[in-house]
Amino acid sequence: MEVGAFRGNDPEIAGQDKPTGPTILLVEDNRTLSMLTADLLHQEGFTVDLLYEGRPALEQVRRVQYRLILMNVNLPDVNGLDVTRQLKADPLTCTIPIIIVTAQAMQVDRERSRQAGADAYLSKPYDVYDLFELIRQLLA
């Protein structure tokens, strides 16, 4: 399992203030997008853990108390909606808000996300301010 973490010791963000906000898990297989998103979230004060596959996310969520999960749908090992279903079915993880982030932008995709138990849906490309607003709403 490969986990990237933005907890204040990453060389790319050395010298920046350590985040003091909630810890978010970002599950995204596109490494460039995941690093960019994590950096933006870090700048907003969030602690961000990165995972590039879905199965490790199921294990990681049981070890770390995440306040929110950003979940891509098309992951290399498993569908992000399946991971979402499993997390929402587990009493230990069912209360963690999950935002589905995907390039699939049809109404049927939104409905599938809702049926999987996602708390919100954001289609790529998205405005980062929309992402921040969704996160703030779900953490309020």
Image: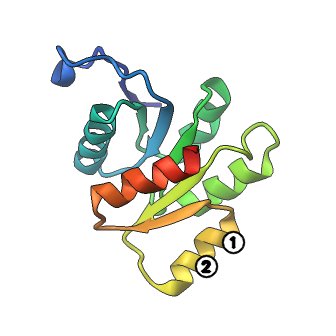
Pick the front one: 6 or 134: 134
- Label 2 Cα crowd, 10 Å radius (few <14 / some 14-19 / many 20+): few
Q: Nearer the viewer, residue 72 or 15?
A: 15
Whether tag 2 and tag 1 are in contact, CB under 8 A, the answer is yes
The residue positioned farthest toward the bottom in the image shown: 107
Q: Quadrant of residue 119?
A: bottom right
Residue type for callout 2? Glu
Residue beneath disc 2? 111
Q: Tell me, yes or no, if residue 70 can be seen here.
A: no
Residue 65 left/right relative to 48: right
Q: Position of residue 92 (x, y in %)?
A: 78, 36
Measured in 3D between alpha carbons, the distance from the residue under mark 2 to the one under mark 1, in whole angstroms, is: 6 Å
Query: Residue 115, labelled with which disc?
Result: 1
Viewer can see residue 57:
yes
**Residue 56 in the figure: left or right of residue 93:** left
Name the residue rendered at 50%, 30% in the picture: 22
Residue depicted at 27% across the width and 41% down the height: 40
Q: Is residue 43 above or below residue 132?
A: above
- In the image, taking residue 125 as reference, residue 19 lies left or right, namely right
Point out the image quarter for the C terminus: top right
